[in-house]
């Protein structure tokens, strides 16, 4: 037999991999038990997605067998090796995984029925029992879970069997429905603004959630849309990528103009809650853009970024509020902003100067400390006569801009104010990125010692990144103070720093569009540290989801949702190298005399290297 | 005559080990000097000390009659000493053009204000930086320009990385160029080509060059003077022919004949 052909033969799998099924199935069951015990199903049961069929609580459990059923039969595709085609045994694997997973909730049902573990496990409650058995007793519950998990696992396995196009339609229907039902409040709010209540009344049921009929209609629409749009989106994006510099720039500019116009027009049609949400997204976007300069461009891992947010807030409060305990000049917001810039810049220098000489982990830990120090100073009794201690400073007046007044009770005005500053921050990031300073930051991020040896004053350059970041954060703090009307030390917890960092990382470090998407997805949908997002029900599980999302992103897509070209090259170096070298071979014109020269040199070499 | 770079009794220690001791050295304007020596002789330490990455315990380094002891590496570069690294250290995720643009940092001035308001001075400076970068890169023929400009530096082949590193050092507009094993890892053809380029660096760009090199053919072909280091002490100095016949040098490289050892 010829060995080279036998290498390319498909690797035969020996029937069903029982060990794999057992392992992943029990993991899935365990995950379902844990999700139940942290209270997700019960807590989220009130949020109905499809009337009478599915609540967010059930969804938090049943997505698990579907995903595990998909993962278990999945095979690693090796280049150059033909993988086996998926077949019946994969359906069986999915089904068995689902059945094994069903043991999780079943054990839980019997457990709750027979033992009382309420003391250590708060969610070990009759409520959970009712939810798990659907209120119909143990027998129905057990059979129900076996059937549901088995079917979902089977469906997960079946995903491998259907064609790519079908899979795409299937996925877009599922996610489309999920999206529309989860964003119910946003959609109703928007449609009220446009006077389309009748449509949403028909779409959503009285007690929330899509009606059965409307979800079927929507599924049909989404499916056919995905069928019609097949490949179109990809074609458009690839055409955009193929454009040359000038053309691309003009298209990008047009896109930016559309987005800006939308963000100006849209809030007019939105209600108070949605505008409040947008204002929060804007505040965090402003922070994230600042942190993006510090972390994404200059590579300084600043975990105490909230300090500058606090400085901005407190400076504004002291200078504008009549209730400021020590010094209350009650200045106008416009003048205050200038002072805020100066003070934030100075704080940046004071904190930065000692910190910036450190590297890597040390720097992260020290900035973390400084972030807490600033908050504790504002909280301390020592500075209470100046900053009011735990009571903070209240009665910060709204911003009077002459034509309009920006105040917390009118979130639309706050959003517009934030929008102005976000646009400013985007402009600053964009311009600095392509300047001498931006290049120096990048060089420092790459290799600090070499950057220094190439004539870059690393201390000053890093300090500048720190100060620019500090100023942007302080703007956000100033607007927050005016919006909320008061500042308290506890609004500036370390958690804020962490969440902004997660926004930057998940969105796409070093990329403005990434940070934009990141803050909309995380702050808008999940919510900020204290600010509720679209999924208000998730409030108590927010940090869990943040954590899970961060871990997932680091494993599967470390470059973020919208990666900068540079970062994705960095993280996928090998693939990029292959492409670059393939391109090289076509273009490379080596001198034809290379061979002759080489031979001549070798001879010479032997004579000369005698030393 | 005043030397461009002059080193007096330089001593560098790591823990208890004398990496360099009692090193005296000079380079004149327009010279090409090679520093050779067996592994661990202190050649790279010598470069690191000149470029300010390591501070000496004793001794003094004068560049254009001014002491540069205690200056930060970027200040040394600013005075006109640029270097390359033995284990090529580019900015791998920056494009080839950016690598050369960024090293002009100390020769340019624009800061935040210029970038934000796109002042004419800023735009002019950006244009100049770009032009100078292209000019520097085209010194290496077509290897680093064209479609290469916008590619990240990590895609380059080993020899091209070495070339880019030299280009990056050239772009800091130095008077003295320190090359740490410029041809290491290159094949004979590439070595021959780079040998020619090193001579041209002096004749066309006016750089004075100090070079660490193990390839004796390159050393012979380009250097006016050769300094041999062993255990941190210069053991011989002179033209290539003088040095290569020096008994101490041969001993440092090959060891003593067996008879005398016993």
Image: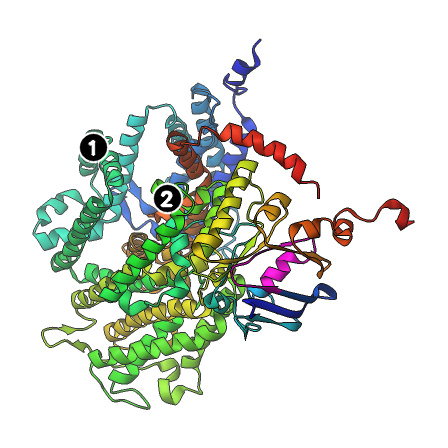
Magenta run includes residue A76:
no
* Marks 1 and 2, how far apart at CA: 41 Å
Q: Which residue is tagged 2? A: B145
* x, y percent for residue A58: 36, 43
Viewer-proximal residue, A102 or B46? B46
The disc placed on residue B104 is none
* x, y percent for residue A591: 44, 31
* x, y percent for residue A138: 44, 38
Circles 1, 2 touching at the beta carbon (< 8 Å): no
Colouring style: rainbow
Disc number lying in front (1 or 2)? 2
Assign a secondary structure to mark 2. loop
Viewer-proximal residue, B259 or A241? B259
* Residue at 56%, 45% in the rendered image: B183
- Magenta segment range? B26-49
Viewer-proximal residue, A114 or A610? A610
* x, y percent for residue A391: 35, 81
Q: Is residue B20 visible?
A: yes
Magenta run includes residue B32:
yes
- Label 2 is found on which chain of the structure? B
Q: Residue furthest right?
A: B262
* Residue at 24%, 42% in the rendered image: A244
Q: Which residue is tagged 1? A: A229
Whether residue B89 is situated above or below residue A601 in the rendered picture: below
Same chain under badges 1 and 2? The reply is: no
Q: Quadrant of the C terminus of chain A?
A: top right
Whether residue A305 is situated above or below residue A131 in the rendered picture: below
């Amino acid at each position: 037999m010829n060995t080279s052909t036998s290498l390319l033969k498909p690797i035969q799998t020996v029937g069903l991999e029982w060990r794999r099924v057992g392992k992943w199935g029990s993991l899935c069951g365990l995950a379902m038990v844990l999700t139940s015990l942290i209270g997700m199903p019960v807590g989220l049961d009130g949020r109905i997605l499809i009337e009478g069929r599915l609540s967010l609580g059930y969804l938090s459990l049943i997505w698990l067998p579907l995903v595990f059923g998909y993962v278990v039969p999945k095979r690693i595709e090796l280049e150059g090796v033909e993988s086996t085609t998926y077949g019946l045994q994969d359906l069986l694997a999915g089904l068995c995984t689902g059945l094994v997973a069903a043991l999780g909730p079943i054990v839980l049902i019997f457990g709750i029925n027979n033992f009382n573990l309420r003391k250590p496990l708060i969610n070990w409650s009759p409520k959970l029992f009712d939810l798990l058995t659907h209120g119909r007793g143990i027998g129905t519950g057990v059979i129900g879970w076996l059937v549901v998990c088995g079917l979902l696992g089977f469906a997960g396995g079946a995903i491998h069997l259907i064609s790519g196009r079908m899979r795409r339609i299937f996925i877009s229907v599922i996610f489309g429905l999920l999206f529309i039902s989860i964003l119910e409040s946003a959609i109703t709010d928007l449609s009220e603004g446009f006077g389309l209540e009748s449509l949403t009344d028909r779409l959503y049921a009285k007690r929330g959630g899509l009606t059965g009929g409307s979800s079927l209609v929507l599924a049909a629409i989404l499916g056919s849309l995905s069928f019609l749009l097949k490949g179109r989106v990809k074609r458009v994006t690839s055409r955009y990528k193929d454009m040359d510099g000038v053309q691309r720039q003009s298209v990008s500019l047009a896109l930016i103009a559309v987005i800006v116009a939308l963000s100006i027009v849209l809030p007019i049609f939105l209600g108070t809650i949605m505008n409040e949400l947008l204002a929060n997204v804007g505040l965090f976007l402003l922070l994230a853009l600042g942190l993006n300069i510090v972390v994404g461009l200059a590579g300084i891992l600043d975990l105490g970024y909230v300090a500058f947010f606090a400085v901005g807030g407190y400076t504004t409060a002291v200078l504008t509020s009549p209730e400021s305990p020590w010094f209350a000049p009650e200045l106008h917001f416009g003048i205050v902003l200038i002072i805020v810039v100066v003070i934030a810049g100075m704080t940046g220098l004071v904190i930065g100067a000692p910190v910036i000489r450190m590297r890597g982990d040390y720097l992260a830990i020290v900035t973390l400390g400084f972030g807490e120090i600033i908050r504790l100073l504002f909280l301390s009794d020592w500075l209470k006569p100046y900053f009011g201690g735990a009571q903070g400073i209240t009665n910060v007046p709204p911003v009077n801009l002459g034509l309009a007044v920006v105040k917390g009770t009118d979130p639309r005005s706050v959003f517009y104010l934030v929008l102005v500053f976000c646009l400013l921050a985007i402009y600053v990031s964009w311009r600095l990125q392509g300047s001498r300073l931006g290049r120096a930051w990048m060089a420092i991020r790459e290799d600090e010692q070499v950057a220094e040896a190439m004539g870059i004053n690393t201390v000053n350059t890093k300090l500048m990144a720190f100060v620019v970041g500090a100023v942007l954060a302080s703007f956000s703090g100033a607007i927050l103070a005016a919006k909320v009307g008061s500042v308290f030390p506890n609004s500036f917890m370390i958690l804020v720093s962490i969440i902004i960092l997660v926004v930057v990382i998940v969105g796409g470090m070093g990329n403005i569009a990434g940070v934009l998407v990141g803050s909309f997805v995380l702050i808008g949908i999940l919510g900020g540290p204290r600010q509720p997002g679209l999924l208000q029900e998730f409030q108590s599980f927010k940090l869990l989801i943040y954590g899970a999302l961060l871990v997932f992103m680091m494993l599967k897509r470390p470059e973020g949702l919208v990666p900068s070209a540079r970062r994705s090259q960095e993280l996928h170096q090998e693939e990029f190298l292959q492409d670059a070298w393939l391109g090289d071979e076509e273009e490379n014109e080596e001198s034809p005399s290379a061979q002759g020269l080489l031979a001549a040199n070798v001879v010479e070499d032997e004579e000369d290297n005698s030393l | 005559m005043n030397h461009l770079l002059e080193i007096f009794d330089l001593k560098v220690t790591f823990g208890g080990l004398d990496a360099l001791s009692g090193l005296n050295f000079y380079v004149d304007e327009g010279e090409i000097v090679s520093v050779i020596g067996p592994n661990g002789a202190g050649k790279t330490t010598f470069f690191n000390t000149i470029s300010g990455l390591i501070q000496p315990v004793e001794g003094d380094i004068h560049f254009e009659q001014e002491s540069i002891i205690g200056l930060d590496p970027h200040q040394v570069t600013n005075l006109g000493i640029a270097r390359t690294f033995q284990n090529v250290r580019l900015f791998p995720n920056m494009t080839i053009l950016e690598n050369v643009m960024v090293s002009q940092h100390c020769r340019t001035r624009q800061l935040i204000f210029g970038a934000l308001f796109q002042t004419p001075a800023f735009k002019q400076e950006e244009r100049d930086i770009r032009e100078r970068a292209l000019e520097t890169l085209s010194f290496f023929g077509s290897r680093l320009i064209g479609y290469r400009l916008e590619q990240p530096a990590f895609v380059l082949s080993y020899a091209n990385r070495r070339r880019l590193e030299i280009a990056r050092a050239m772009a800091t507009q130095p008077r003295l160029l320190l090359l740490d094993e410029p041809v290491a890892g290159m094949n004979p053809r590439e070595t021959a080509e780079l040998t020619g380029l090193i001579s041209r660096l002096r004749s066309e760009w006016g750089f004075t060059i100090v070079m660490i090199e193990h390839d004796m053919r390159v050393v012979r072909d380009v250097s006016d003077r050769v300094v041999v280091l062993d255990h941190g002490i210069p053991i011989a100095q002179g033209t290539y022919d003088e040095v290569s016949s020096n008994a101490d040098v041969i001993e440092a490289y090959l060891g003593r004949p067996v008879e005398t050892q016993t």
